[in-house]
Amino acid sequence: MPRTWCRALCRTLAWARESYKLDFLTMSSLEAPEATTDTPRPTGGTFASFRSPGYPTLWFCGLFSFLSVQMQMLLRGLLAWDLTEREAALGITYLCFGIAMLISTPLGGVASDRLPKRRIMLVSQSVITAAAAGMGAVVIADMAQFWMLLVAAVSQGAAFGFLGPARIAISRELVGREHLGNAITLALLSMNGTRVFAPAAAGVLAGVPTVGIGGTYLISAVFALISWVLMLRIPKSVGQPVRASDPTQSTRWVNPFGEIINGIRYVMEDKRLKRLVIASFFVVVFGFNYVAFLPALIEGEFGLGEQWVGYISSASAIGAVAVAMPLASRADSKQARPIMTASGFAFGVGIIGFGFAPTFWLAFGVILVVGGAFTVYQSLSNTLALAMADDEHQGRVQSLMMLAFAGFGIAAAPMGALAEWIGLRYSLAATGVVVLVASLSYSILERRSDPSNPAS
C-alpha cells in the first residue's frame, strides 16, 4: 500500500513538471523575480496561479507541509491512547494544540505585517519539523511520555498560528489581488487532497512492526523538511513587510498587543469587513464542529466500527476536493460573494441533514455536500476578506479569519455537553441552525448595504 501512494505522488509531481515546466532539481523556473510592477500575472483559468512565478514553489511547500500535518493529526491520537489508554487524554492533546494556535494566531498576523514573511515561514516550519522528528526519536527510543506529546502539540499549534497568515500574505503578493481567490482555492485543494489519504497512510504505516508510530513520525518529519527546503527557494525579496502608515512605527519595535488591537479596530471600522469576519467566525466555530461528533454518530448511532469513521472522514475531504477544481476558476469573479452566501446555506442545511440521517449511506452522501460547501465558504470568505483589507493589515485580517479554526476545538467541549443533554442529533441540528442564521444575517445586512449605492 505505501508503494501505491509513493507512485501516486510521483505521478502528481511528473504531471506538474510536464504541465508547468517545473524543474524540481534546480527549481529555477519556480523562483519569483524581484517584486516589481512589471511582474507578469496569470491570465485566468483553473490553474491561473501556477503561471505566476514563484507560486508553484509555495504550493508544493504547502503540499508537503499538509502531508506531514495530516499524518501527525492521527499519530497524535494513537500515541496519546498508547501512553495513557484514557479518552480524556485525547481531548487534552487536541485542546493544547487549539489553545496554542488561538494565542499565537493574532501574534502571527502582527508578525506577518511587520516582519519578513519568508523568514516567519522558515522558522515556523522548522518548529513543525523538529517537533515531529523529536517525537519520532523518543518513541523509537522507548522514552516517550505524555507530557512530551503535549509539548509537541503546543509547539506545532503555535507554529501554525504564525505560518498561516504569512503563507496567505505571500500568495497575495505572488499572484496579485485579482487571482488571490484562485491561489487560496488551490492551496485548499492540496490540504483537502492530503486529508483523503495521508491519515490512512499514517495508520497503515503505524501498524507495520518495522515502522510503527515512531517511524511514521519520522516519515512525517521528512515531509515537513522537504517543505522547509522548498521554502528556501522563495526569494528573499518576496514577503517583505509593508511600511506602517505611521512613519514613527517603521523605525522602532512596536507593541505586538497594540498591533493586534489596531488590527481589530481596523476591521471594526470597516462595516462590510466586520460583517464578513463575524459571520465567518460563527459559521466555522459552530459548523465545523461536526468533525468532532463523527465518531459518536457513526459508532454510537449507527453501531459501526472505527474504520467507518475513517470512511466518512474521507468522504468530507473528497467533497472538498471535488468542488475545488471548478471553484478555482470562479473564486475571483463577481459572483464570489453570492456563491459564498449560498455555500453557507448549503453548509448549514447539510449539517442538519447529517444529524438526522437515518442510515450510514445517507449520511455518507450528505457529508460529501457538507465537505464541498464548507470548502467553497472557506475559500471565498478568505478571498473577500483579504481583497477588502489594505496591504498593511493583510496578516492581521487573515489571523482573525483563522481564529475560528482555533476556536472550534475549544467549542467542542460545551457542544459535547449539549449533546449529552439534548441528544447528539439535536445538537448537530443546532449547530446547523447557527450556521444558517449567521449566513442569513450576513446576506440581509449585505443587501441593505448595497455597494452600488454611494451612500452605503
Image (spheres, grey):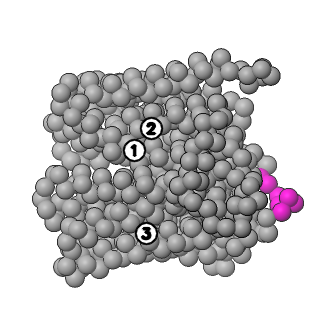
Callout 3 secondary element: helix
In the picture, the quarter occupied by the C terminus is top right
Q: CA distance from mark 1 to mark 2?
A: 9 Å
Badge 3 or badge 1: first in the primary sequence: 3
- For disc 2, the marked residue is 284
- For disc 1, the marked residue is 407
- For disc 3, the marked residue is 128
Residue 289 magenta: no
The one nearer the camera, 290 or 30, is 290
- CB under 8 Å between discs 1 and 2: yes
Q: CA distance from mark 3 to mark 1?
A: 21 Å
Give percent across and percent down for residue 94.
30, 54
Q: Residue furthest front?
A: 248
Give percent across and percent down for residue 230.
58, 72
Please report the bounds of the magenta region as a residue range. Answer: 36-42
Label 3 or label 1, whichever lies nearer to me, is 1
Residue 39 magenta: yes
